[in-house]
Image (cartoon, coloured by chain):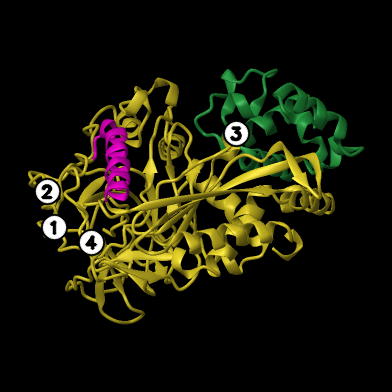
Chain colours: A green, B yellow
Amino acid sequence: MNEQELHAVLIRALTEVAPDVDPAAIDPQTDLADQLDIDSIDFLNVLVKVHEQTGIEIPERDYPKLSTLDDAVAYLLAAQPRGAGTDA
Amino acid sequence: MPSLGADMTSGTLLEWRVKPGDEVKRGDIVAVVDTSKAEIEVEIFEDGVIDELLVAEGTRVPVGTALATVRAAGGEATAAAPRARAPLTVTSAPPASAPPAPAPPVAAPPVAAPPAHPAPAPHLAVPAPPQPLEEHRLRASPLARRVAEQLGVDLAAVAGSGPAGAITRADVEHAAAGAVTPAAPALAAPAPAAPAPAAPGPAASGAPAPPPSPPAAPAGEPGDRALAMRQAIGALMARSKREIPHYYLQTQIDMSRALAWLAEENLRRPLAERLLSSALLLSAAARAAAATPALNGFWVDEAFRPAEGVHLGVAISLRGGGLVAPALHDADRSSLDELMAGLRDLVTRARAGRLRGSEMSDPTITVTNLGEQGVELVHGVIYPPQVALVGFGAVLERPWAADGMIGARPIVTATLAADHRASDGHAGSRFLTLIDRQLQKPEEL
């Protein structure tokens, strides 16, 4: 997946967990949990949805690297299995 | 119309999930009901075939009104009680072959029916489950979004009539229909369905008649929803504080072992199977509750009734405010994996989807984990007729003395609010001690 696709995957996961959130209103550089008032279960649910869509495995110690939208997209881009653009 | 709360007098049938001719099995979700505080999925409690839908979507009817008729396989049609506690009014629908599934009329406002507010039916019997205390400050409810999608309505173009301008289903339909239907679907009950002489609930013995509760909020108007929710919270919590002589205990628990075990365990687990510390806390509380029967059950008829199993109510804050406390069934006998999966599912459905009637009515003891929000300590208010509420604060690094040394450790403050009619501090103390002990042996949870 490219950056835009990953961004879309994240937004979809976030709005599934927090349906009242306006995707356009998310500040890509502010902490998502604070900004969207999501807790650890919501956050886990978001990561699980992202994993289901992308196949990317995210170790627990890396959770802090996905705390903002921009960071999360960057992390996922870098973490994609090789060749993911075609077979994922 | 099932009773989904001690103070629920009527409900709006939002959506049918079945149509005439559909086969249903006990436990299937057949409809979605709006209690004015929450949208709840209603399960059916018998097997059969849906014969006729008696209540149109969008209609508000008193508790006890038959919603549909169900034919037992090859048998007679009986009024469906999509919850055991709804009365089984037998109707004379013939065991006819199912009609070709007519789409139920949407939001057909009944004509000239009396504003059937069921007389303040004494809510005996209903074991006052934790109230679905929900507030919709959403700009659009999940249902409204779905309907908008189905009808091809652009939400941005719909004016919301709900609290804080939230867009409701009625608004969406209104927009789709070019404003043909009245915004507020049907205040009235279509049939002269008697105001349900109190549904015979599982605990058919009548909880101490709830004290003069404030009039159930005036029904269907979306704008009344926030008010209804505040009233429900007010009525239930006031009742709790008025009737229940609470006593409070607290203890600090060293979470070092539990968290170290958790981190290790999660290393081995794929994302979707990872555990959160909440699951450990819930498991420990459930097991401690099983070992302390005086805290797990209901105060009904001036006496304590221990519950059969431990159905752990989990207080879940809702987006935009309010909370619900649905049950994790048999939590004391569930593995951490099961608890974790159950918790994720409950939280997801409570916040973005819907809960089920049985989840709302079953908790035997409730846990609130306000630690997620960062506070250190929470002293809870018991959900009547339960007799105990367990609170967990945030796990915070704190100085801790052990073995003659002071070090920094992750500490959680666990609290218990318990009903002094049902138990004494001795039992409560034992309960908190048990939680601590279990958390020192996380591998056994």
- Spot the residue most to the bottom: B75
| Residue B195: assigned label | 1
N-terminal-most mark, 3 or 2: 2
Residue receiving disc 4: B208
Between label 4 and label 2, give the one nearer the viewer: 4
Q: Chain of mark 1?
A: B
Q: The numbered mark 3 sits on a residue in which chain?
A: B
Reading the image, the residue beneath label 2 is: B116
User: Which residue occupies 26% across, 58% down?
Assistant: B1
Chain letter belonging to callout 2:
B
Q: Confirm or deny contact between disc 2 and disc 1 (CB under 8 A).
A: yes
The residue at the point 80 percent across, 39 percent down is B407
Answer with left or right where residue B9 lies relative to residue B443.
left
Question: In the rendered view, does B98 fall on the left or right side of B402?
Answer: left
Q: Residue B366 in magenta?
A: no
Closer to viewer: mark 1 or mark 4? 4
> In x, y percent, where is residue B188?
15, 45
Q: Give whichever of discs 2 and 1 has the lower sequence position.
A: 2
- Predominant SS of the magenta segment: helix
The residue beneath circle 3 is B374
Residue at 81% across / 50% down in the picture? B403
| Amino acid on which the number 4 mark rests in the picture | Pro
Position in image of residue B411 (x %, y %): 68, 43
The segment highlighted magenta reads B220-242
